[in-house]
Amino acid sequence: MHDVLIAGGLVFDGEGGRPRQADLAVREGRVVAVGRLGGAAARLRLDAEGAWVLPGLVDVHTHYDLCLDWPGLGAHCLRQGVTSVVGGNCGLGEADVAAVFARAAAARLPVHFAQLAPLGPLRSRVVPRCAGRAARADERPRVAAEAAAALDAGAAGLSWGPYHANALMDREELLAAARVAAARGKPLCVHRRSEGAEGLRATREAVDLARASGARLQISHLKAAGRRNWSAFAEVVRVVEEGRRSLDLGVDLYPYDASLTYLSATIPDELKADGGLLARLRTPDGWAAARAGVERWFRERQGPERVVLLEPGLGVARGSTLEEAARHLGCADPAEAALRLVAADPKGTGGWATYREMMSPAHVEELLGRSYAAIASDAVPEEAGAGLSAHPRVYSTFARVLARASAQGEEALSDAVRRCTGLPAERLGLGRGRLVPGAPADALVLRGLEDRASYEEPELYPRGVEAVVVGGQVALLAGEPTGEARGELLRP
């Protein structure tokens, strides 16, 4: 007898194959059969007639490691159909990978969890961030050893980005770490050093690292950020596609033209990398340098009327733009408001902010048409509360992609399913994302899928996620979590 039988749905295999009307049988946590199974007996039968049956969605770019103690995290994932998540992206997070896994185990998540090892925190164990420099020749092997230990503790790969200590790493230091990943067959996941004015150079840097080290490369949230930088987009894509001819190189993206990051992103990296930003803002010269950088951001990327504050201090209302914050605070201009908000934050970030129309909508659509581009949410937890940041990508990334693809026909939908399941899982070696005999039984039933989240109402889950199976256990039924499933800690 089967444990679960999903009967009569249109089954997508996650490999890009043509979907077919079939039953799907699950036993002991595995898919055991896909086909016309007639009257096969099962302890639980899910009627999927008229619905889609997909592999569980695989979100390889999240920051959920930062909110593992949030009780609603598992339900948040299930309501989107997500069954596997990866934390530790962008070089952010905790150096102690074993401790992260311990927290994930304690959370008893109903979804599978994997973690990347963030290079910035790892190298801070060797080179104090306050040193404000790249690692010396004698320190590089020690940083590489930290990376090796993290990978051996089960990290799915290494991550690196432009934040904090990561920004101080030079080519030789990065190359030493990338070679560690290559030796273990694990990827280097890169939030490029720049996605704006220096985005093309940063793309070449990432591709060069992969070529010189032999590491698999995953470029995170590929984009050309800021209206003045949109003209570089075609060349960025050309560099990526040229690299793909000879390298194991993938990318991911989210299907929105707004980004989400700290308010302090408007301040030049050189003022932040060593952790000394708040001290600099207390000096006239430091304040002036930061102000000039913020004003340059407004000129080169987007105006302050499109920067929406999600967790501002100083009594500024959530959802205010920087222009509105300046009026509330009585500032001379939005640049002054940005600096005051950052200076008032003990962490020196100013909190999360949504940056509207950061990317060209046409460029987003173009990347969505590239079959090699995996879909990922880049979901960021809201540090100030018991929820998640107010960007629709956190709630409806996958529904948006799948709903739009369905309007383009069966072939487009099948490829979109692959890019939400099998492709991202393969990029990180997770062993998930397929519905074929012998595969882990992570599946979802979608009926009448509707993407509802918007910039105005971002915190809306999609309609149509009817049932979710995780590891052979029904984790969500009739749109509600069952509390019965337990995900695995994935240590590829």
Image (cartoon, helix red, strand yellow):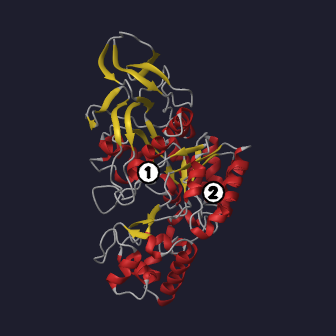
> Which one is in front, 380 or 461?
461
**Amino acid type of the residue that numbered disc 2 sits on in the rendered structure:** Leu
Secondary structure under tag 2 reads helix
Secondary structure under tag 1 reads loop
> Which one is in front, 233 or 156?
233
Q: Is residue 75 visible?
A: yes
Position of 257 relative to 12 (above/below): below
Q: Residues within 10 Å of mark 1 (few under 14, many from 20)?
A: some
Residue plotted at (36% across, 59% down): 390
> Which one is in front, 57 or 429?
57
Disc assigned to residue 96: 1
Disc assigned to residue 174: 2
Quadrant, the N terminus: top left
Gap in angstroms between the C-alphas marked 1 and 2 = 19 Å
Q: Is residue 106 left or right of residue 405?
A: left
Asked whether disc 1 touches disc 2, contact meaning CB atoms under 8 Å apart, the reply is no
Which label sits in the foreground, 1 or 2?
Answer: 2
* Residue 281 position in % (x across, y down): 45, 82
Residue plotted at (47% across, 41% down): 402
**Amino acid type of the residue that numbered disc 1 sits on in the rendered structure:** Asp
Residue plotted at (65% across, 61% down): 202
